[in-house]
Amino acid sequence: MSFDLFEGTGRPRRPVPSPEHPDPRPWDLPDLPEWRRRGRSAPKFAMPNGLIAAVNTALNLRRPLLLTGAAGSGKSTVVELIAAELGVAPVLRWHITSKTTLQAGLYEYDALERLRATQNNDPDTSIERFVKLGPLGTALADREKPRAVLIDEIDKSDLDLPGDMLNVLEAGEFEITPLWRTVRADADRDHLVRGADGREDYLVSGGTVRTEHYPVIVFTSNQERTFPAPFLRRCVRYKMDPPDEAFLTRIVTEHLGGVDERQREIIGDFARRLREGQEMAISQLIELVELVTSHRLGPDQVNEVREILLEPLAGK
């Protein structure tokens, strides 16, 4: 398929037929790159030195893994690989911001929606209908198997969240307050609630979630803050250093199966930019190499696309 899908004329394009697309339509676009497709197999990833040992240490000690490194260095991909190998996919994801609360990761209760249902004489106003477990709460509530949870960009949280979260993980339980209030007279009462993964059959007994399978937790941090010692000592830590040219070549080879001279030049330029302190994501390199490899771009087009895709993340 031609690279020139858009020409800026506003007139319907006339795509050129090919053996792969004998009857192309104006709206036909390329497929998503393999690593961006839903339901794909485990992502391809070149393991830096020491990371496999860090993962195995965390799994054997049942400790959270704290991955630190620049944005786009592949930290969030690691949990996908772990989940695929352990057979505990799909991964539950919890993206952290400065306003994130611990309760949001454990459960949500929509009291306003329940009030509306009551006022509208809805036949089902049972309280569990309006409770939904968060990503961490879902992992703790799953009684079938351990779950893998990505807690992304923990360095953006408020000061207390990391410690509060680890207190819940150490205890392996938490109360769902609106459910607990309804069972004070009957401590053995059970509820079935929805999880962050869409399932609706997570059992909560006596208003309290008690984990049977300690989850596989991966924290990621972009190095935007330091953490208190109590949090750090409860995690297995691994720092992902900026990749050099040899490691970048390994990554591209993992994705494309080989590297030719044109790709080596692109990789070398990318490595130079990293050495100069430009903040770049490895995905930018992969997308540039994929685009140049899959289309017959002239030198001017290659340079133009390079400058578009390799714009530094920090605007340097």
Image (spheres, rainbow, N blue to C red):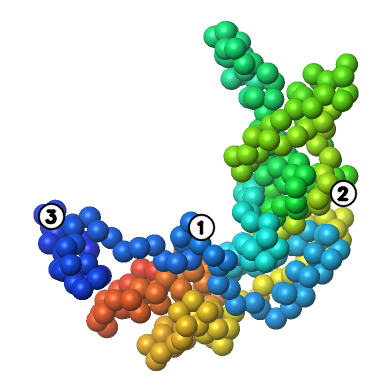
SS at mark 3? loop
| Image quarter (top left, top right, bottom left or bottom right) of the N terminus | bottom left
- State which mark lies toward you, 1 or 3: 1
Quarter of the view holding residue 265: bottom left
Secondary structure, mark 1, is loop
- From the image, tell me which residue sits under label 1: 39
The CA span between labels 1 and 3 is 33 Å
| Mark sitting earlier along the chain (2/3) | 3
For badge 3, the amino acid type reads Pro
Give above or below for 59 relative to 272.
Answer: above
- Residue 121 falls left or right of residue 6: right
Q: Residue at x 69, y 31 (%)?
A: 193
Q: Residue 63's x, y, as percent?
A: 82, 59
Task: Name the spot of residue 315 as percent of width and height, x first.
Answer: 47, 64
Whole-Å distance between the Cαs marked 1 and 2?
33 Å
The amino acid type, in three-letter code, at marker 1 is Gly
State whether residue 307 is above or below residue 9.
below
Which residue is the site of mark 2?
170
**Residue under numbered circle 3:** 12
Mark 2 neighbour class, 10 Å CA radius: few under 14, some 14 to 19, many 20 or more:
few
